[in-house]
Image (tube, grey):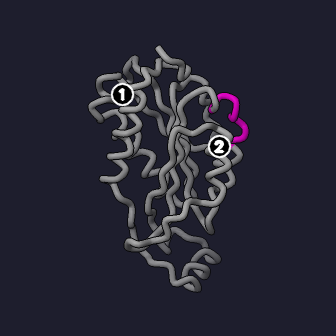
């Protein structure tokens, strides 16, 4: 990502099989490339929540998680709880990756996202279609996918992700978030 002097955005992500981490990487690049992101000199860094990234040096956070059986990954929930005080002090967005198949796929959010959003005071949240690749699953997961007759394939929507990056960058520009703590400039 860029090494500018503008606001820094942490894209912290829990990704069981890599698809959500790939989405986080695309989102980070898209945040920097938006018109608002370039005006601000915005930089974005992707970090896995399992490495416990510290949100203190970032003006904003996007916290993302893969969704399985209607729930966020436990590591994302634990990271949010561990950093709750810092997250409440800056703009935060929540990204869920999980529904698969052709529209209309299940549009319901993971049932544990609303409590996280309320605790943090999230600016927004979005659920994006995901990827289901049986070759990346464990034996038990493959059996469950077969039993549920879940659609196989990559259903991620890059255009929708780019559009969301633009919304986030525009919000940061409109609220004039500074480069370190989420405080207004």
Task: Please report whichever mark, 1 or 2, sits nearer to the chain's N-terminal start.
Answer: 1
Please tell me which residue is depicted at 46% across the width and 14% down the height of the picture: 185
Mark linked to residue 118: 2
Viewed as shown, does residue 12 lie left or right of 1? right
Q: Position of residue 16 (x, y in %)?
A: 57, 58
Dot 2 surroundings within 10 Å: few (below 14), some, or many (20 or more)? Answer: few
Please tell me which residue is depicted at 53% across the width and 26% down the height of the picture: 58
Q: Foreground: 165 or 49? A: 165
The label nearer to you, 1 versus 2, is 2
Does 99 appear in magenta? no
Q: Is residue 117 visible?
A: yes
Please tell me which residue is depicted at 63% across the width and 40% down the height of the picture: 51
Please tell me which residue is depicted at 35% across the width and 58% down the height of the picture: 157
Considering only vertical position in the picture, is 18 above or below 36? below
Q: Is residue 29 visible?
A: no
Considering only vertical position in the picture, is 143 above or below 44? below
Quadrant assignment, res 57? top right
Mark linked to residue 2: 1
Label 2: state its secondary structure: helix
The answer to the question of whether label 1 and label 2 lie on touching residues, with beta carbons closer than 8 A, is no
Distance from Cα at disc 1 to Cα at disc 2:
31 Å
Question: Bounds of the magenta span?
Answer: 79-87
Considering only vertical position in the picture, is 139 above or below 87? below
**Number of numbered discs visible in the structure rendering:** 2
Q: Quadrant of the N terminus?
A: top left
Q: Position of residue 119 (x, y in %)?
A: 68, 40
Viewed as shown, does residue 155 lie left or right of 137? left
């Amino acid at each position: 990502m860029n090494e500018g002097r503008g606001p820094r955005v942490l894209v912290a992500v829990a990704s069981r099989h890599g698809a959500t981490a790939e989405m986080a990487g695309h989102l980070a690049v898209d945040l920097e490339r938006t018109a608002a992101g370039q005006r601000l000199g915005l930089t974005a860094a992707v970090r896995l929540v399992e490495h416990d990234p510290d949100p203190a040096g970032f003006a904003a956070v996007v916290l993302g998680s893969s969704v399985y059986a209607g729930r966020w990954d436990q590591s994302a929930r634990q990271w949010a709880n561990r950093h709750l005080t810092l997250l409440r002090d800056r703009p935060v967005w929540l990204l869920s990756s999980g529904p698969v198949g052709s529209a209309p796929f299940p549009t319901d959010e993971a049932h544990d996202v609303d409590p996280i959003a309320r605790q943090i005071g999230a600016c927004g949240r979005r659920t994006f279609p995901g990827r289901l690749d049986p070759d990346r699953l464990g034996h038990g997961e493959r059996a469950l996918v077969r039993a549920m007759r879940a659609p196989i394939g990559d259903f991620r929507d890059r255009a929708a992700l780019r559009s969301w990056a633009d919304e986030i960058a525009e919000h940061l520009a409109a609220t004039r978030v500074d480069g370190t703590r989420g405080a207004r400039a």
